[in-house]
Amino acid sequence: MKTSTILKWVTGACEALLGIPFLGGIFILSYVWTPLMVMLILHIITLVFSVKEREKIHGSILGIVASCIGWVPIVGMILHIIAAIALMVDAAMGNRQKRSNIV
């Protein structure tokens, strides 16, 4: 499995946790927006690996946008959920394409 695919699964799961109504917001506020900075760094790292490995970058870009605008209460939650879905779909499609090339 490629490094970018692993990173997409990890960042997708983290985005899904941040997108949980109320709990994600409480987590972000209790750590004074530090989770958004950590996620921004992780999304940039994932983007670099995705470009290097010629994988899709849509989920990483949405994750960067979600991390930058995530401090807005309702908009942030929606963006985190959308980014989580996009990252996990990108990761799943990357695995599927790899399997179809082997067979």
Image (cartoon, rainbow, N blue to C red):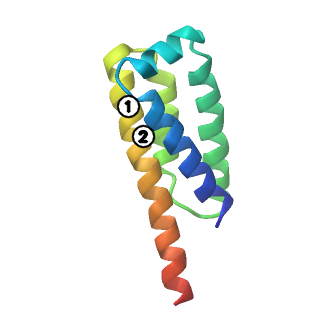
User: Picture coordinates of residue 9 (x, y %)?
Assistant: 54, 51
Q: Is residue 55 above or below residue 102?
A: above
Residue shown at 57%/14% (left/top)? 33
Q: Residues within 10 Å of mark 2 (few under 14, many from 20)?
A: many
Residue shown at 53%/84% (left/top)? 101
For residue 83, the mark is 2
Classify residue 16 by image quadrant. top left
Secondary structure of the residue carrying numbered label 1: helix
Residue shown at 37%/31% (left/top)? 79
Kind of residue sitting beneath label 2: Ala
Q: Which residue is mark 1?
A: 79
Mark 1–mark 2 distance (CA, rounded to whole Å): 6 Å
User: Picture coordinates of residue 19 (x, y %)?
Assistant: 40, 29
- Give whichever of 52, 95 is nearer the camera: 95
Classify residue 66 by image quadrant. top left
User: Picture coordinates of residue 50 (x, y %)?
Assistant: 61, 56
**Left or right: where 43 falls relative to 61:** right
Classify residue 80 by image quadrant. top left
- Give whichever of 3, 24 is nearer the camera: 24
**Left or right: where 98 falls relative to 92:** right
